[in-house]
Amino acid sequence: MRIGIGLAGLQFGGCQINALDLAKELTRRGHEVVAFAIHDTPLISVAPLADKLGIALHILPVEKNPFRQARHVAKLVSDHRLDIVHVFGAWLAEPTTLALRSRPETALVVTNWTMDNIKGLPPMTPLILGTESLQEEAAHAVRSAPVWVLEPPVDTTTDQHDERARSAFREQWSVNGTTTLLVIVSRLDYNMKAEGIADAIRAMELSPDPTRQLAVVGGGDAQHALSQLADEVNTALGWRAVVMTGPLEDPSSAYSAADLVLGMGGAALRALAFQKPLVVLGEDGFSKPFTPETVGYFLHEGFYGRGNIHDPVNSLHTSIVSTLALARSSDLAHWGRQVLLTRFSLSRAADRLLTIYDIALKRTTSLRRAADATYVSARYLAGRSRHAWQVVTRISQPGGMK
């Protein structure tokens, strides 16, 4: 098949890495794969990774509305005679649906790997979600197309513990070889991420032990604020308990260097690939160790959660201490990798994806394509009308033109 993979953006992040890993695996199996993304200016671009994996990445101009954006997508589809367009950002569903309106021979598949169902997706287009709980919720929505679960996969061949990488990371960041190193690899963004990272930084004050450090790897709009917090904690303790590395083009050495990983989503799954004990972070104070007792929750809800914790820092500290103790007394890390190999391997995900593509191609018709394009157009135009009415209402009020 000729397959187009639409990336959610150019920022180096979990969803983009997963999409490119799948593209690489599909290419290895003999399919022709190209990737595309809408132009943006990321802190660290995923483009070098695409080049490293041998995936052609086309960067499309950004347009102000989906109809104009659709022209660029349509040209890409036509130039490469694509059989499948698979977008990994729900917002790409709108222009891609419009681009394929008159191409019933090309199937569209949409993946939403956020932690919430998104309203307004074209109802006759096959949808992939990342958790069983989201699939159950989506089943109650008005949809005429299948909804599948496909968790973000991990390349378990590439992502493995490397003792030399462990030593190199620790040497570069002046972490003693005997130090217990906690690692976070994440976008340092206020949205979803910063809260849990800040809790982890503060939790270091509850363990005033110079033989334990936290390394935070990544960049984003919250990087400065989190770095300031790390400086405050380090000053209060009198040693460098928190190491802020900034963004790294390849964070795999950080995973190898870790004795325990804190994270969510794809970063949490990669930790299991590197055979590391794991504490999963979320929002509103959520933290939970990944153990045989909690695995059922994560397989159903995903590697994330929302809490309502009175003292999230102390709760996270307790999770860290208990997970380290369990890892020392059991084969927790080995067990975690076995779970990953069984459920989240790249090979298994590619098998499932090809089945989904086959079904999507068989279901694609001119009628369904036109119906989805009409639905997307109507929603967009209705949204524009609401916005225009709000503007008119606002300026017609007394003082509205001030």
Image (spheres, grey):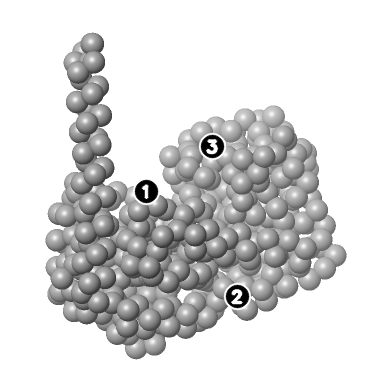
Q: Nearer the viewer, mark 1 or mark 2?
A: 2
| Crowd around label 3: few <14 · some 14–19 · many ≥20 (10 Å) | some
Identify the amino acid type marked 1. Answer: Leu
| Visible residue check, residue 38 | no
Q: CA distance from mark 1 to mark 2?
A: 32 Å
Identify the amino acid type marked 2. Answer: Arg
- Percent coordinates x, y for residue 47 in the rendering: 32, 62
| Crowd around label 2: few <14 · some 14–19 · many ≥20 (10 Å) | some
| Visible residue check, residue 286 | yes
Q: Nearer the viewer, residue 182 or 361?
A: 361
When the figure is inspected, residue 244 is found, relative to residue 401, above or below; the finding is below
Q: Nearer the viewer, residue 182 or 69?
A: 69
- Which label is found at residue 343? 2
| Crowd around label 1: few <14 · some 14–19 · many ≥20 (10 Å) | some
When the figure is inspected, residue 264 is found, relative to residue 235, above or below; the finding is below
Location of mark 3 (residue): 227
Residue in the image at 61% along x and 59% along y: 301
- Percent coordinates x, y for residue 282 in the rendering: 60, 48
Location of mark 1 (residue): 43
Q: CA distance from mark 2 to mark 3?
A: 36 Å
Secondary structure of the residue carrying tag 3 is: helix
Along the horizontal axis of the image, is 257 left or right of 79? right
